[in-house]
C-alpha cells in the first residue's frame, strides 16, 4: 500500500535579524528582462556520505527535473566547480562556498536522506544565508515526486513571490474509445486521472477559481450539453439548453459560468445564474461569439467573434459594456486566454506555417509570437500567476500538452500518458489534506 508523505518540519526562511530583504537575491520574473540565476544541486548524502541514500538520490533527481521547467534558472553541474563537491554535509558550516562563488553559482542545494526521511536546504552562495530548509518523513519512492514539487514550490515562492506553476493543476481532453474524456494532472503531469466517462466528446474544460469544479462541453448524439464536474463529489452533471449549442463554458471569478448558446439562432455568450438560467447576451452581434475568458476582477472579458467576418479577438469592458477589437493581424485568431491581471491576452493564430500562439500586451499595444512549431500550436491557457502558458501542439507527432512562458521560452512537454491530449486549462491545485 502506498504510503503518504508527511511534512513534519519546516526550517523555513531562517534569515538573521541583520540580514534584510535587500541582502537576499530576488528577482522579478514578470519584468521586461528576466534575470537568470545559476543553481547547483550538490550530490545527495546519506548517513555514510554522498550517494548512500537511494531515496535522497531519487529526490535530488526529481528536484533537478522540476528546476528544468523554470526558464529563469540555469541548472549547473558539478564538473563546472573547481575541485568537485565542496561540501562535507548539509549545513552552511559544511560547505566551502569559495569554489561556488568562483563558478558563478548563485544558489546551492544540499540534500540528505536516512531511511524514509529527507532533508533539503537552499543557500545563497555569496551571503551563505539559508533561504529554504525543509525536512520530510514517512516518504517512500512513490511520494518522492510530490515532495520534490512542494520543495521547488517553496523555492520559487522565496525567490519570486510566486509559485503558481507548482501549486496548480491542469485539465485537458484525451482520446478514449473513439471519443474524448477529461483528465486532470499536476502541471508536471503527476497524478494523471480520468475524471469523466460521459461518452461522446468532452472538450473545452475551464476551472472554477477555487479549483472545486470544471465546466466543459459534452458533444454526443444528444447534441451539445454543458457539463460540470465536481471535485468534492467526483462526478459530473450534464445540462442541455435550447438551441442545441453549448460551447466553451468558462467560470467567471464569482463562480458563475459564461457559455456560448444559440438561443436566438446563432451563438452568443451568456452568463448563467445560480439556477443555470441565462441572462441577456453579454456582447450581442450577428456573428458567432465563443471562448470567453476573464481577468481576476471579472470586469474584463476577452472572446472570439466573427462579427467582422473571420474570427478575431475582442475585449468586453463589463463596467461600461464597450467592445474593443484586439487582433488586427491575420484572418483567423481564436481561443483567447486573459492573464489574471488583465494585461495580456494569449491566443492562437493561423499563419502560413500553421497555428501558432501569440501574445498581446493590452497596455503597450504590442503583439508578438511565442511558439514556433513545427506542427500546430493551439488552445493556450495562462497559469494562475500569468507567467506560464500551456498549449496543445502536434510538433512531436500526435497532439500533446506543452508549456512555455509569456516571453516565449523554450517549450517543454508535460507528461500526459499515451494518446493525444489537447485543450489544456490551468487552475489552482486543491489544498493538501
Image: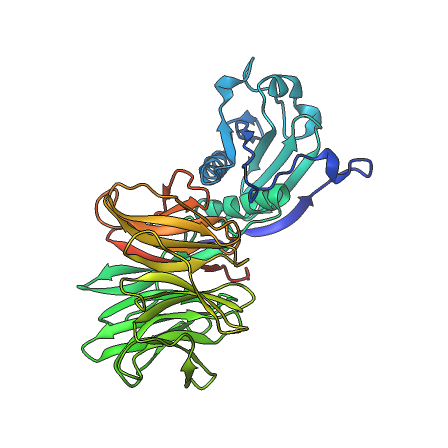
Q: How many marks?
A: 0
Q: Position of residue 289 (x, y in %)?
A: 34, 70
- Camera sees residue 417: no
The color scheme shown is: rainbow
Query: Which is more toward the observer, 91 or 261?
Result: 261
Q: Quadrant of residue 15?
A: top right
Q: Height in image: 92 above or below 369?
A: above
Residue under the point 50% across and 21% down: 78
- Please indicate whether residue 373 sits to the left or right of residue 127 in the image: left
The furthest residue to the top? 83
Which residue is rendered at x = 47% and y = 54% of the image? 383
Quadrant hosting residue 228: bottom left
Point out residue 422 in the picture as x, y percentages from the top left corner: 30, 56
Q: Is residue 36 left or right of residue 236?
A: right
Along the line of sight, which residue is nearer the eye, 408 or 97?
408
Q: Quadrant of the N terminus?
A: bottom left
Between 46 and 42, the one lying in front of the other is 42
Residue 112 occupies quadrant: top right
- Indicate whether 411 appears above or below 103: below
Q: Is residue 62 visible?
A: yes
Left or right: where does residue 390 sit relative to residue 254? left
Residue 407 appears at what percent x and percent y? 46, 42
Image-based side of 101 in relation to 334, left or right: right
The front one of 191 and 45 is 191
Please identify the quadrant where the C terminus is shown: bottom right
* Residue 239 on image: x %, y %: 33, 82
Q: Is residue 79 above or below residue 200?
A: above
Amino acid at each position: 500500500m502506498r504510503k503518504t508523505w508527511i511534512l513534519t518540519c519546516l526550517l523555513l526562511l531562517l534569515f538573521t535579524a541583520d540580514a534584510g530583504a535587500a541582502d537576499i537575491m530576488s528577482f522579478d520574473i514578470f519584468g521586461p528582462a528576466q534575470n537568470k540565476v545559476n543553481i547547483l544541486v550538490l550530490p545527495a548524502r546519506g548517513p555514510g556520505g554522498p550517494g548512500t541514500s537511494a531515496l535522497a538520490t531519487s529526490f535530488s533527481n526529481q528536484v533537478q527535473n522540476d528546476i528544468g521547467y523554470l526558464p529563469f534558472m540555469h541548472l549547473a553541474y558539478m564538473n563546472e566547480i573547481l575541485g568537485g563537491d565542496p561540501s562535507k554535509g548539509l549545513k552552511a558550516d559544511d560547505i566551502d562556498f569559495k569554489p561556488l562563488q568562483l563558478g558563478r553559482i548563485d544558489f546551492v542545494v544540499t540534500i540528505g536522506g536516512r531511511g524514509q526521511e529527507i532533508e533539503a536546504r537552499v543557500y545563497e552562495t555569496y551571503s551563505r544565508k539559508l533561504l529554504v530548509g525543509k525536512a520530510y518523513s514517512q516518504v517512500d519512492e512513490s511520494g518522492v515526486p510530490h515532495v520534490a514539487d512542494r520543495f521547488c514550490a517553496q523555492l520559487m515562492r522565496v525567490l519570486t513571490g510566486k509559485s503558481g506553476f507548482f501549486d496548480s493543476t491542469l485539465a485537458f481532453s484525451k482520446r478514449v474509445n473513439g471519443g474524448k474524456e477529461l483528465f486532470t494532472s499536476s502541471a508536471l503531469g503527476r497524478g494523471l486521472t480520468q475524471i469523466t466517462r460521459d461518452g461522446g466528446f468532452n472538450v473545452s474544460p475551464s476551472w472554477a477559481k477555487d479549483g472545486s469544479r470544471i465546466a466543459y462541453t459534452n458533444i454526443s448524439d444528444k447534441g451539445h450539453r454543458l457539463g460540470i464536474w465536481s471535485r468534492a463529489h467526483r462526478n459530473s452533471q450534464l445540462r442541455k439548453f435550447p438551441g442545441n449549442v453549448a460551447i466553451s463554458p468558462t467560470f467567471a471569478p464569482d463562480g458563475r459560468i459564461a457559455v456560448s448558446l444559440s438561443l436566438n439562432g446563432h451563438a452568443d455568450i451568456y452568463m448563467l445564474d445560480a439556477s443555470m438560467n441565462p441572462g441577456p447576451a453579454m456582447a450581442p452581434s450577428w456573428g458567432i461569439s465563443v471562448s470567453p475568458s476573464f481577468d481576476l476582477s471579472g470586469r474584463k472579458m476577452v472572446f472570439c467573434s466573427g462579427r467582422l467576418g473571420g474570427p478575431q479577438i475582442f475585449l468586453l469592458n463589463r463596467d461600461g459594456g464597450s467592445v474593443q477589437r484586439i487582433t488586427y493581424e491575420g484572418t483567423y485568431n481564436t481561443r483567447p486566454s486573459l492573464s489574471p491581471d488583465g494585461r495580456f491576452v494569449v491566443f492562437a493564430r493561423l499563419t502560413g506555417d500553421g497555428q501558432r500562439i501569440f501574445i498581446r500586451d493590452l497596455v503597450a499595444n504590442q503583439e508578438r509570437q511565442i511558439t514556433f512549431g513545427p506542427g500546430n500550436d493551439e488552445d493556450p491557457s495562462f497559469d494562475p500567476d500569468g507567467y506560464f502558458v500551456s498549449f496543445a501542439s502536434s510538433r512531436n507527432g500526435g497532439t500533446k500538452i506543452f508549456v512555455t512562458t509569456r516571453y516565449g521560452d523554450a517549450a517543454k512537454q508535460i507528461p500526459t500518458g499515451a494518446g493525444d491530449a489537447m485543450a489544456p486549462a490551468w487552475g489552482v491545485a486543491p489544498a493538501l489534506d
